[in-house]
């Protein structure tokens, strides 16, 4: 629509071009493109300088389009999200410092905060009997050499098949699915030692239930505190690769189990969830050799990056790693691995200014407490399930199928001769 003279002074319900552009996450020129396409109406501002826009109309377009400018970090897609903010080497969940949340609250309580913006003191998640039995049968049928992510992918599929209400995408229904799915995934993993805490009359804290599936060593309070904090801290980390996959699935209105499956599919990549396994191997070798120096030297000599170091979102040490290292100080069994981790950092720092990330902290826990090489990956996957659900809840409220990038065709131009057959 064309601009019309404003009837009087601009009121609180009208926005300037810059305000509209900021709300839409686009450049001012794009706002006028929306006007020319009939997606927005505008009126001339008082004095004929610029235009004003109806605030409610702009907000409606923002909800429909979900469009933002490309990020300065090099990504092509940017999404509005109220879940995680990473700023000035700090990580916040819904505006609250994630490290402080993990120090004061259990994984289940932090998950509730991330999902709903409300804390539920004493929250416990319970696996439905039917879903847990189906998931255990499916996982039990896998080959013995299957990894933890293999088992989790099968478990989530089995759990989905037992839930006839999984297609209900109302927030309350999605939250009910999430609260049952997370403990089902943990309960489907094989117990490595001791009795299964999940078999008790009362729901066990998730960290306690997961511990017996990570190691045969007995749990102690300091070690459980580290595991619980790790679970809480890893719930979300902005638009990581697996989270983007989860949002794409949710944009197609896939049910929450399918959203988690999409996230798990990406998580297994060596540059994402499996990165903690590489850090575990390096740290294990450093402990066995009595020094991290030759281990770091081997990596530098062959041009390989040292696992567990550096993060593109932090200039200094990953705050999640800092928090876990502090808790690991209280775990007597972790002293050797913790010293080796610090030596990995200090040795590498002579050549590159890299700091520890959360994978190295997870490796200290997994190496010192007898966990398998994929122990950190298991912790990551179980924890991040809550984050994928949180992003699904956001995405279900957006315009469906809005995540549709355009391909840039680089193949031969048509018409081509019809292919010949041999």
Image (cartoon, helix red, strand yellow):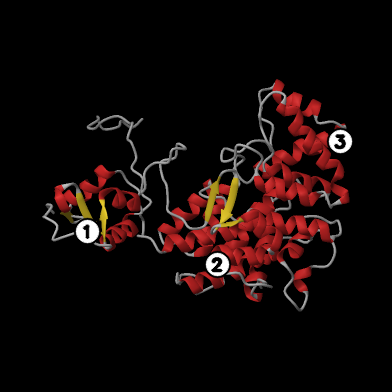
Above or below for 375 versus 260: above
Label whose residue precedes the other's in the sequence (1 or 3): 1
Asked whether disc 1 touches disc 3, contact meaning CB atoms under 8 Å apart, the reply is: no
Mark whose residue sits in front, 2 or 3: 3
Residue corresponding to mark 3: 288
- Asked whether 77 or 134 is in front, the reply is 77
User: What residue sits 46% from the left and 70% below the top?
Assistant: 167
Q: Tell me the residue at 21%/54% (across/down).
A: 52
Q: Quadrant of residue 225?
A: bottom right
**Crowd band around label 2 with a 10 angstrom C-alpha radius: few (<14), some (14–19), many (20+):** many
Residue 156 percent location from the top left of the image: 59, 62
Relative placement, left or right, of 121 versus 413 is right
Q: Which residue is mark 2?
A: 160
Q: Residues within 10 Å of mark 1 (few under 14, many from 20)?
A: some
Q: Secondary structure at mark 2?
A: helix
259 or 43, which lies in front? 43
- Residues at circles 2 and 3 in contact by the CB criterion of under 8 Å: no
Work out how far the residue at label 2 is from the one at label 3, CA to CA, in angstroms: 43 Å
Quadrant location of the C terminus in the rendered image: top left
- In the rendered image, which quarter contains the N terminus? bottom left
Quadrant in which residue 284 is drawn:
top right
Identity of the residue drawn at 44% across and 53% down: 248
Where residue 19 sits: x, y (%)?
31, 51
Give the total number of marks visible in the rendering.
3
Extreme residue toward the top, this view: 301
For label 1, the residue is 10
Q: Earlier in the sequence, mark 1 or mark 2?
A: 1
Disc 1 from disc 2: Cα separation? 53 Å
Frontmost of labels 1 and 2 is: 1
Could you tell me which secondary element the residue under label 1 belongs to? loop
Q: Residue at x 67, y 62 (%)?
A: 107
């Amino acid at each position: 629509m064309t601009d019309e003279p404003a009837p009087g002074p601009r009121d609180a319900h009208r926005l300037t071009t810059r305000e509209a552009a900021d709300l839409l996450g686009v450049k001012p020129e794009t706002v006028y493109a929306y006007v020319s396409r009939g997606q927005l109406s505008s009126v001339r501002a008082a004095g004929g300088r610029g235009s004003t826009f109806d605030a409610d109309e702009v907000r409606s377009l923002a909800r429909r389009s979900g469009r933002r400018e490309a990020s300065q970090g090099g990504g092509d897609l940017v999404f509005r999200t109220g879940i995680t903010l990473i700023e000035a080497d700090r990580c916040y969940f819904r505006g609250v410092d994630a490290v402080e949340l993990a120090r004061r609250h259990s994984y289940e309580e932090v998950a509730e905060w991330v999902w709903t913006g409300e804390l539920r003191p004493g929250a416990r998640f319970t696996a439905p009997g039917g879903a847990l039995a189906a998931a255990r049968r499916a996982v039990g049928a896998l080959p013995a050499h299957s990894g933890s992510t293999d088992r989790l992918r099968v478990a989530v599929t089995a759990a989905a098949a037992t839930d006839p209400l999984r297609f209900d995408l109302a927030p309350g229904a999605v939250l009910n699915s999430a609260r049952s799915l997370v403990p089902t995934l943990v309960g489907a993993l094989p117990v490595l030692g001791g009795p299964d805490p999940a078999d008790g009359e009362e729901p066990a804290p998730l960290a306690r239930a997961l511990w017996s599936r990570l190691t045969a060593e007995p749990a102690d309070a300091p070690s459980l505190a580290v595991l619980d904090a790790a679970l809480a801290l890893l719930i979300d980390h902005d638009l990581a690769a697996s989270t983007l996959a989860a949002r794409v699935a949710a944009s197609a209105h896939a049910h929450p189990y399918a959203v988690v499956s999409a996230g798990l599919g990406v998580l297994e990549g060596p540059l994402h969830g499996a990165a903690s396994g590489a850090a575990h191997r390096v740290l294990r070798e450093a402990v066995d050799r009595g020094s991290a120096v030759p281990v770091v030297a081997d990596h530098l000599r062959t041009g390989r990056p040292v696992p567990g170091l550096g993060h593109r979102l932090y200039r200094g040490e990953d705050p999640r790693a800092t928090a876990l290292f502090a808790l690991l100080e209280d775990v007597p069994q972790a002293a050797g691995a913790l010293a080796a981790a610090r030596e990995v950092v200090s040795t590498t720092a002579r050549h590159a200014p890299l700091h520890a990330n959360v994978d190295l902290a997870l490796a200290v826990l997994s190496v010192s407490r007898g966990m398998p090489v994929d122990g950190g990956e298991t912790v990551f996957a179980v924890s991040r399930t809550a984050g994928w659900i949180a992003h699904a809840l956001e995405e279900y409220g957006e315009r469906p199928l809005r995540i549709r990038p355009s391909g840039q065709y680089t193949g031969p131009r048509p018409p081509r001769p019809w292919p010949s057959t041999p």
